[in-house]
Image (cartoon, grey):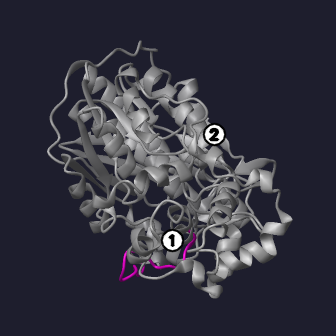
Amino acid sequence: MNSASLPDPRRARTFRFIGCGYEAGEARLRYAFDDGPEMVECVVFPDAPRLQGSAKAAFDRAIQLLHWIAGVSYYKAGAVGRLAIENARPEPGVLALIQSVYRHGLAEFAYRNNLDLRAEWSVSAPSGMAMAVPEVGLSARTLVPIGGGKDSLVAVEALRSVGAEATATWIGDSPLIATCAARTGLPTLNIRRTLAPELFAYNRMGAWNGHVPVTAINSAILVCASLLYGYDSIAFANERSASSATLEYDGQLVNHQWSKGAGFERDFAAVVRESIAKDLRYFSLLRCWSELAVTRAFARLPQYFDVFSSCNRNFRILGSRPVDRWCGQCPKCHFVFLALAPFLPKPRLLSIFGRNLLDDEALAPGFDALLEYRGHKPFECVGEGAEARAAMAELADRPEWREDALVARFRSEILPQLDAASLGIGPWLEPQGEHGVPERLAGALRWLT
């Protein structure tokens, strides 16, 4: 698409939610800036059955929710001061969730671009009659989102330990994720999402760009999928470390992983239960566990060592991807290496990554960021600075690691500045806090200990 023919979305006054529809397995979500060209996103559900009755009514509500949440990808191009919902009137709880997605889910985007996203919302659609949300009669089956990394594979095995009927699902065309999903041995479901080409044209002309809460969008897509295919639960693999913010900006916390955090999970699950389908459960199986605890569990799963990757460069929409599964340069590579080191034999870990990242002095700034040494942690899906410090302190006591360049530097330069009492790895391996795992799947939590 020729970007020269498009108006600058940053000069627009209003971002419009025009409408959405669904037919024959394809959802079409329509947006525009002012009276500019429509941007149409397509989400394709393969071999989708026809729904009737309460299931169809619930699915129609889910498509509306997806339309409102997925619009965050397009809104950011203009970051305009007014958002107008034209096609349907969301209930108060649903509108509050959507507003939260656009403010807190875009907090990192606002911070990086020095923007104020406290925009005005308007709803021009007429009020409809409030309807009681029924049970749809969904089957006792679970959708497990697969991301290619360690967390979702741990969730798969935890569910397998209690004999849960589960399907590995992912959105997009990543060959790496497809390989991981196949390795689980579970039935698979691959949903295709195609962004409107106008968005990429806007980006080429210099529109605002940056991080969006992808997990919120994927969650809304999987609610639609659960209703289409008859699953009563969606089990994400978001751990408690995801709730930890990176910094504070403009009076609010900025968390790269906001839509993976406990607050979003709680609010989204409530909207699903109260406004979509009473018998559909949305939760994270790993919510009570730290990144280190999840990594310890993954270290017991050698069948995945040759296929998993958490390196985000593998999952770019555009641009080059690493030849190997690990680039060795990004924060995700650094954190996963550090988190696995206490739980795997050193030769095994080096065979996964192809080299020793902790013996490369050039990588010191990256590991310093993970430790929150002289700055905040990276804007990435990594653990808390305190647990990174606990992992590094554990390695500093081990003969096989203590002489490696970055571990030795930690011992001599950083460790003397820390409170030794706060560096034990043990507390990070214990569950903490509440979770939303339904009773029929609660036994899976024991597998993680």
Instruction: Identify the mark nearer the N-term, 1 or 2.
Output: 2
The extreme front residue here reads 399
| Residue shown at the point (43%, 66%) measured from the top left | 198
Determine which quarter of the picture holds residue 407. bottom right
| Residue ranking furthest to the right | 417
Q: Residues within 10 Å of mark 2 (few under 14, many from 20)?
A: some
* Boundaries of the magenta span: 319-331
25 or 346, which lies in front?
346
Say the numbered circle drawn on residue 180. none
Residue 92 in the figure: left or right of residue 295? right
Which residue position is annotated with label 1? 333
The secondary structure that dominates the magenta segment is loop
Number of labels in the image equals 2
> Regarding mark 1 in the picture, which secondary structure is present there?
helix
Between disc 1 and disc 2, the foreground one is 1
Specify whether 148 is left or right of 31: left
Q: Is residue 47 magenta?
A: no
Q: Is residue 360 visible?
A: yes
The N terminus is located in which quarter?
A: bottom left
Query: To which quarter of the image does residue 95 belong?
Result: top right
Q: Residue under label 2, please give it.
A: 121
The kind of secondary structure element at disc 2 is strand
When the figure is inspected, residue 371 is found, relative to residue 290, above or below; the finding is: below
* Residue 438 percent location from the top left of the image: 41, 24
Q: Could you tell me the amino acid type at mark 2?
A: Trp
In the image, is residue 265 above or below residue 81? above
Question: In the image, what residue occupies the spot 25% across and 38% down?
Answer: 166
Residue 94: x and y, percent?
53, 30
